[in-house]
Image (cartoon, rainbow, N blue to C red):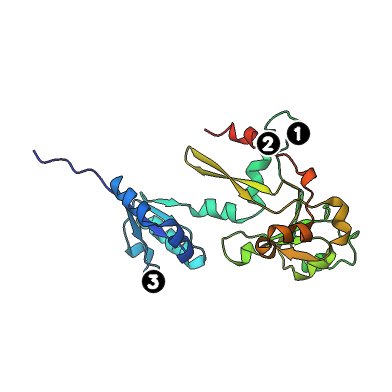
Amino acid sequence: MAEMKTKRFSIGYALLPKKQKSFVQDSLVNLAKQRGIDLIKIDSDKPLVDQGPFDCVLHKLYGEEWRNQLRQYVVSNPSSVVIDFLDAIEWLHNRISMLDVVLEIDEVENDETSSFGVPKQVVVYEPEKLKVEDDETASFEGLKFPVIAKPLVADGSAKSHKMLLIFSTEGFDELKTPTVLQEFVNHGGMIFKVYVVGKYVKCVKRKSLPDIDEEKLESLHGSLSFSHISNLTSDERHVTLIPSRDRHVRLKPLILNSRLP
């Protein structure tokens, strides 16, 4: 009796060159083969519908042409899994709607030293609303300087990553609408990123913007790009942003980590 062949799964991946270089390593390809998975690069010069079929399409490309190709592929291959699907992507590409799930979460713990929520923010659609004469008239529904300015669309493009830390109305001169203005909150120079795949949850720590001493805010004007801050040395950050090490917000990471499986 002939041996039954174990079914192999094919995963077509479509990533930007930078992502592909960092993600699709030989070790990953070999490990996948051992687990019965074949990782196949999708040829961006050919129609997606003419390739495969794949058991799963893993992608991180953008643009209307690519979206149309995905739609055509799903119609022709309804059993194929697409990660992420278009509806989910559109929801996460908007910096306001992506935070809806956070607003629906109940208080993590009745603990006066911890907080969980979304910083105050507002979306500015009309360019003229950014043309204000002084800091007092730039209330924007109660936001206080400093604020973070982000493009409304977060689609992974270079444009969507252009963010500014704004200390006064002079920093509005470089902004283009629609833009999200979000009140900057001191957070100890650390952020937590949570990755979820099915039931698997992974929480990691990343360095972030340093805290800003409120007493020194009056001497800070204009804006700084995130890329400029990231390229500063630790000493330069201290001089430029004047962080206060004694006033770090304590995030208590154990409260979050204790809820991860």
- Tag shown at residue 113: 1
Point out the tag, 3 or 2, that comes first from the N-terminus: 3
Residue 144: x %, y % from top left: 84, 53
Dot 3: what SS? loop
Identify which residue, 251 or 136, lies in the foreground.
Answer: 251
Q: Nearer the viewer, mark 3 or mark 2?
A: 2
How many numbered marks does the figure carry? 3
Q: Is residue 125 shown left or right of residue 138? A: left
Point out the tag, 1 or 2, that comes first from the N-terminus: 1
Corner quadrant of residue 248 = top right
- Residue on which the image places disc 3: 45
Point out the tag, 3 or 1, that comes first from the N-terminus: 3
**Alpha carbon of mark 1 to alpha carbon of mark 2: how far?**
8 Å
- Residue on which the image places disc 2: 252
Q: Are circles 1 and 2 on residues that touch, CB within 8 Å?
A: yes
**Alpha carbon of mark 3 to alpha carbon of mark 2: how far?**
48 Å
Residue projecting furthest to the left: 1
Identify the amino acid type marked 1.
Answer: Thr
Identify the amino acid type marked 2.
Answer: Lys
Q: Nearer the viewer, mark 3 or mark 1?
A: 1
**Alpha carbon of mark 3 to alpha carbon of mark 1: how far?**
54 Å
Dot 2: what SS? loop
Identify the amino acid type marked 3.
Answer: Asp
Residue 4: x %, y % from top left: 17, 41
Q: Are circles 3 and 1 on residues that touch, CB within 8 Å?
A: no
Q: Label 1: how many residues lie within 10 Å, few (<14), some (14-19) or many (20+)?
A: few
Task: Please tell me whether residue 242 is drawn above or below residue 114 in the rendered image.
Answer: below
